[in-house]
Amino acid sequence: MFSDFGIFVFQKLEEMNIQNAQKTVDNWINEHGVRYFNELTNMAQLTEEVGEVARIIARRYGEQSEKESDKDKDLGEELADVLFVVLCLANQTGVALQKAFDERMDKKAKRDHDRHHNNEKLK
């Protein structure tokens, strides 16, 4: 199922995997952007977006008080911004992120299953 968002058509999240998300971002860049920012610019952008997530987490869930100007910030939107830039970096560096993620999850499952179940700090 596709939704029309102006002239840009995007795939709904419940039908999207990482590979499709990479294609969706690439389509968006080609239709709405001039080109990808270079990798260093995107790395700086990613750092900025992660900082925005950190600010919300620190103030909403941590010990810092939340400023009035931050109370309307949407954590989901900020996490989506992080994901968008990660997908841009994967696209422009030739990383098949779905494959890399699947391989990493398999490795973590094999490596960490017993370790976490036997960790007294997690009980």
Image (cartoon, grey):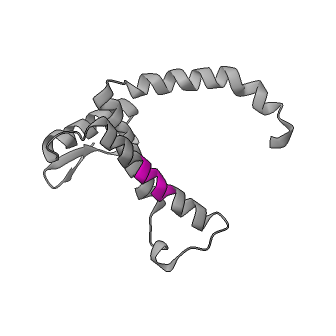
**Residue 54 place in picture, x, y as percent:** 53, 56
- Residue sitting nearer the eye, 92 or 121: 92
Q: Is residue 51 magenta?
A: yes
Q: Residue furthest bottom?
A: 68
Q: Residue at x 37, y 46 (%)?
A: 44
**Residue 22 place in picture, x, y as percent:** 31, 34
Query: Is residue 74 in view from this perspective?
Result: yes
Q: Residue furthest right?
A: 120
> How many dots with numbers?
0
Is residue 118 shown above or below 61? Answer: above
Query: Is residue 123 in view from this perspective?
Result: no
Location of residue 5 by image quarter: bottom left
**Residue 86 place in picture, x, y as percent:** 39, 39
Is residue 74 shown above or below 5? Answer: below
Is residue 56 shown above or below 34? Answer: below
Left or right of 117? Residue 86 is left
Q: Is residue 6 magenta?
A: no
- Residue sitting nearer the eye, 10 or 105: 105
Left or right of 10? Residue 55 is right
**Residue 72 place in picture, x, y as percent:** 45, 72
Q: Main secondary structure of the magenta part?
A: helix
The magenta segment = 47-53
Q: Quadrant of the C terminus?
A: top right
Q: Residue at x 52, y 20 (%)?
A: 103
Q: Quadrant of the N terminus?
A: top left
Q: Residue at x 38, y 41 (%)?
A: 43
Left or right of 43? Residue 11 is left
Location of residue 2 by image quarter: top left
